[in-house]
Image (cartoon, rainbow, N blue to C red):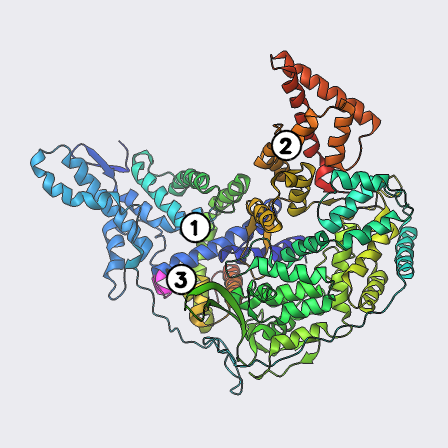
């Protein structure tokens, strides 16, 4: 038995440390999967399947080793399964592409995490109108198309705006990282 | 720009499309290429997708930024699992975010697992209590109920437009049908000038020769009769010639038989059918929605091309169309493009009729030529009153519905279009076309006005776009790399020739058949597709400007391919089907290969384009299986059973499929093959007659699958 397990009677259960690692890596895991399955709803589906596997294999995790590296391997396998299931109904990137991208996403995971923190500040810096629009776009259950109908603008002009706001956010994040978080 | 900046500029629109789930297949391939070729591109992709995902993840948490930070990874394990899990739930008035919810459920699940695990070792008396816990074990891990999340309340009524108070708001109300939309008559019938065809053709030849001299290429020799006849039949009728047609042409000894043949082909209904097929695809694509009545549009085109109506009048009808889409077939062009706020209608009209690639201007000014973003929206403004309405035709006596149709209507909306510039400023566009501003009041019938502005009198751009497309149809390459793009960033290979030919086309009264007669009579159109060392360089596929020193090989369109296949295997004689039936059959076959994209340009991709897929489909498809039957009554069966020597039979199969007799060398080899094949099959105990039939079957299969059959050369 190792440290990631605790015992109740004769049955092992995940240790508190494992539960915490698990909980706190949910976002990283989701974003890692998203780099390979770029549709968030699909990525979530894969994440949930990955979670089930992680949970069933907690005993195999060695405390003190890299948790993200461990779960990313499970995720890779689930992505593969998902892709072979979905083969026919949508466009797909090649295996080579996924490998290259996921390797780099994992290697630079900490850097990405820094960017995610900067993003929170950058959202606040958006013009109120832009912030509202991007929040509406990503609000659960919303999709760009319905959004356009709701706010009474041509779908395309909404797509344009969303693209522009995302570019603004990218630039803002870049600036914040360069200046070390100083505005 | 550095190479990295260029690649990132290329990727940005692709990533934007990817995030909005509207990336076309070939664009996905482009994106993948970018990412795989440059490490900067790879990192950019990761960062962009990460941003997209973070926005998605955070939004599900809550609407405000503070809530996001609570989701961050703690630097040390200072929180016990209990507090970290319970905390978000404590926040008053805010629901638990979906993904945190998931984690909680999973953690809860762990507890249940413990209970279940523990229960296994307990006496059965406790089962009732456990069953109570068992329910959530199976479902929650996989299925997080989304409705636990309360959508953040965001005011729905925010004005997207910063305008001066005088401007009118765009009307988004249900279209109001004007009792009488302003009637704008079609442009007057153009004057048809009698032109000396020899002079026009000579002028074209002189321009083409000038190009040869400048580039120091020597043209290929003139194509032999068989090659030329097959080509011209494919170009004008959309199919290879029948065996009888080929033999008649080869036997014809008249000196001007090529010219006479062009006249004969142009006067046949098969010509109108062929142009109808081509233009239906250009106008509405191969797959159209249920609101579109394809046969009605085809009927309009067929009648127009059969009567050789002036091109500017056809265009006027298509752009100004109004009414019931069953009776007014031309309405279907716009009905097919009114999705996405009629943005496709704007883009397709400009591209197809004027060779203007305005769709890029939808989002930004063109960096390569002077077209501005405003020009897209000014054009778009002309379509703002246009709508389509589903209706039912009712029998006035019985009150029963006779059929459903779509009506293309003009409503009384007034005012400008709105758009956003790249730096986020809202702008206004009033209907304006090539400098002519149109009154934006509700009474104006804008679309009919646009149709008139586009087609009345001398319209060099309308003519040039058409001439360029027709030239490409015959010569395999237009004067510009894409027939849809005459922009100044894409210079024509022969600008004087294009200008001269457009002018003559206008003078002829926008006469389609006249234009085609000229092109078919040019020196360039007579040349063979074979090339020598002196014109090897002349290869537009390699990105060179074309010199037309040989016939460029064209791949058959799927329709040409299907129809040619039917002719080669004489399938049309077996069934005796009428045109509509044949068309339905063909559509069914084609439908397997079309992929469409619901983008602003309504693009679609054809998986059948003279490539490997096409080859495989053909080799293994039902169509071939049927063609290769040798039972009595089939074409192949009839040839095999005929009392004739094998040379005759082989010659005929070759003529039927390749539209030419075999060379002496080919004939010897084919005979050898058929015999060897038959002998081999007979050696396995099959009777001689069947074995021989199998030999011909293999030959026929090989011919149908040859490269020579599936291209136009």
Foreground: disc 1 or disc 3: 3
Left or right, B94 with respect to B218, comes to left
Between residues B106 and B294, which one lies in front from this camera angle? B294
- Magenta region, residue range: B62-68
Q: Is residue B611 magenta?
A: no
- For residue A31, the mark is 1
| Labels 1 and 3 share a subunit | yes
Numbered disc 3: what chain?
A
Along the polypeptide, which appears first: circle 1 or circle 3? Answer: 1
Left or right, A55 with respect to B510, comes to left
Mark 3: which secondary structure?
loop
Name the residue that disc number 3 marks.
A142
Q: Farthest residue toward the bottom?
A: B166
Name the residue that disc number 2 marks.
B634
Left or right, B196 with respect to A155, comes to right
Alpha-carbon span between mark 1 and mark 3: 19 Å
- State the image quarter where residue B114 is shown: top left
Numbered disc 2: what chain?
B
Numbered disc 1: what chain?
A
């Amino acid at each position: 038995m190792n440290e990631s397990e605790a015992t109740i009677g004769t049955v092992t259960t995940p240790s508190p440390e494992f539960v915490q690692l698990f909980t706190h890596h949910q976002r990283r895991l989701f974003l890692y999967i998203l780099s390979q399955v770029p549709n968030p709803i699909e990525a979530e589906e894969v994440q949930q399947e990955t979670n089930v596997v992680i949970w069933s294999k907690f005993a195999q995790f060695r405390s003190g080793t890299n948790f993200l590296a461990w779960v990313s391997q499970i995720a890779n396998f689930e992505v593969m399964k998902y892709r072979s299931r979905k083969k026919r109904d949508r466009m797909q990137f090649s295996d080579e592409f996924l490998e290259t991208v996921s390797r780099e996403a994992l290697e630079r995971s900490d850097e990405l995490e820094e960017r995610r923190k900067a993003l929170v500040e950058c959202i606040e810096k958006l013009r109120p109108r832009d912030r509202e629009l991007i929040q509406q776009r990503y609000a659960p259950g919303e999709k760009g198309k319905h959004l356009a109908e709701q706010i009474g603008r041509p779908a395309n002009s909404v797509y344009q705006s969303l693209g522009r706001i995302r570019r603004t956010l990218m630039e803002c994040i870049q600036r914040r990282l360069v200046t070390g978080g100083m505005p | 720009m550095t190479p990295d900046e260029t690649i990132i500029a290329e990727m940005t629109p692709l990533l934007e499309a990817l995030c909005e789930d509207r990336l076309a297949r070939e664009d996905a391939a482009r994106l993948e290429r970018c990412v795989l070729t440059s490490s900067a591109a790879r990192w950019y992709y990761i960062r962009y997708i990460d941003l997209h995902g973070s926005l998605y993840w955070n939004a599900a948490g809550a609407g405000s930024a503070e809530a996001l930070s609570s989701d961050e990874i703690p630097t040390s394990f200072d929180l016990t699992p209990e507090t970290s899990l319970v905390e978000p739930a404590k926040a008053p008035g805010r629901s638990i975010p979906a993904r945190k919810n998931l984690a909680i459920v999973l953690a809860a699940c762990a507890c249940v697992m413990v209970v279940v695990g523990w229960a296994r070792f307990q006496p059965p008396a406790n089962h009732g209590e456990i069953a109570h816990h068992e329910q959530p074990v199976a479902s929650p891990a996989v299925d997080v109920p989304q409705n636990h999340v309360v959508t953040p309340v965001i005011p729905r009524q925010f004005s997207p437009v910063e305008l001066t108070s005088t401007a009118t708001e765009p009307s988004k109300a249900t279209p109001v049908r004007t009792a009488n939309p302003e009637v704008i008559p079609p442009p007057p019938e153009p004057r048809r000038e009698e032109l000396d065809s020899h002079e026009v053709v000579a002028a074209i030849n002189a321009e083409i020769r000038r190009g040869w001299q400048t580039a120091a290429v020597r043209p290929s020799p003139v194509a032999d009769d068989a090659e030329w006849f097959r080509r011209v039949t494919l170009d004008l009728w959309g199919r290879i010639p029948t065996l009888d047609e080929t033999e008649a042409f080869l036997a014809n000894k008249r000196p001007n038989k090529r010219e006479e043949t062009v006249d004969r082909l142009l006067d046949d209904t098969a010509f109108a059918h062929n142009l109808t097929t081509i233009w239906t695809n250009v106008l509405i694509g191969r797959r159209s929605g249920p609101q579109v009545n394809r046969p009605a549009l085809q009927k309009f085109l067929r009648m127009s091309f059969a009567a050789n109506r002036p091109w500017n009048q056809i265009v006027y009808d298509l752009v100004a169309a109004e009414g019931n889409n069953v009776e007014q077939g031309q309405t279907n062009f716009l009905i097919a493009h009114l999705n996405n706020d009629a943005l496709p209608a704007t883009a397709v009209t400009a591209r197809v009729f004027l060779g203007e690639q305005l769709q890029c201007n939808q989002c930004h000014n063109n960096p390569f030529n002077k077209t501005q973003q405003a020009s897209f929206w000014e054009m778009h403004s002309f379509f703002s009153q246009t709508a389509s309405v589903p209706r039912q035709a009712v029998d006035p006596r019985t009150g029963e519905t006779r059929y459903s149709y779509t009506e293309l209507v003009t409503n009384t909306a007034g005012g400008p279009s709105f758009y956003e510039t790249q730096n986020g400023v809202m702008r206004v566009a009033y209907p304006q076309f090539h400098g002519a501003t149109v009154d934006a009041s509700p009474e104006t019938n804008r679309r009919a006005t646009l149709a008139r502005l586009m087609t009345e009198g001398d319209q060099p751009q309308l003519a040039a776009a058409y001439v360029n497309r027709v030239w490409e149809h015959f010569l395999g390459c237009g004067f510009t790399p894409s027939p849809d793009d005459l922009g100044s960033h894409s210079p024509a290979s022969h600008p004087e020739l294009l200008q001269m030919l457009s002018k003559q086309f206008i003078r002829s009264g926008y006469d389609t058949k006249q234009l085609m007669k000229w092109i078919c009579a040019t020196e360039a159109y007579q040349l063979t597709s074979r090339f020598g060392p002196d014109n090897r360089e002349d290869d537009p596929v390699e990105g060179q400007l074309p010199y037309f020193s040989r016939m460029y090989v064209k791949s058959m369109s799927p329709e040409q391919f299907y129809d040619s296949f039917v002719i080669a295997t004489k399938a049309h004689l077996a069934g005796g089907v009428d045109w509509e039936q044949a068309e339905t059959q063909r559509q069914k076959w084609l439908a397997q290969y079309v992929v469409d994209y619901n983008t602003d340009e309504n693009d679609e991709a054809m998986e059948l384009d003279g490539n490997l897929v096409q080859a495989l489909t053909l080799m293994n498809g039902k169509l071939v299986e049927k063609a290769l039957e040798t039972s009595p009554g089939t074409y192949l069966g009839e040839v095999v059973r005929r009392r004739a020597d094998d040379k005759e039979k082989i010659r005929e199969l070759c003529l039927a499929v390749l539209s030419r007799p075999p060379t002496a060398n080919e004939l010897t080899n084919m005979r050898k093959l058929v015999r060897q094949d038959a002998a081999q099959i007979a050696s396995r105990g099959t009777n001689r007659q069947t074995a021989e039939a199998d030999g011909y079957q293999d030959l026929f299969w090989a011919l149908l699958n040859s490269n020579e059959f599936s291209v136009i050369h």
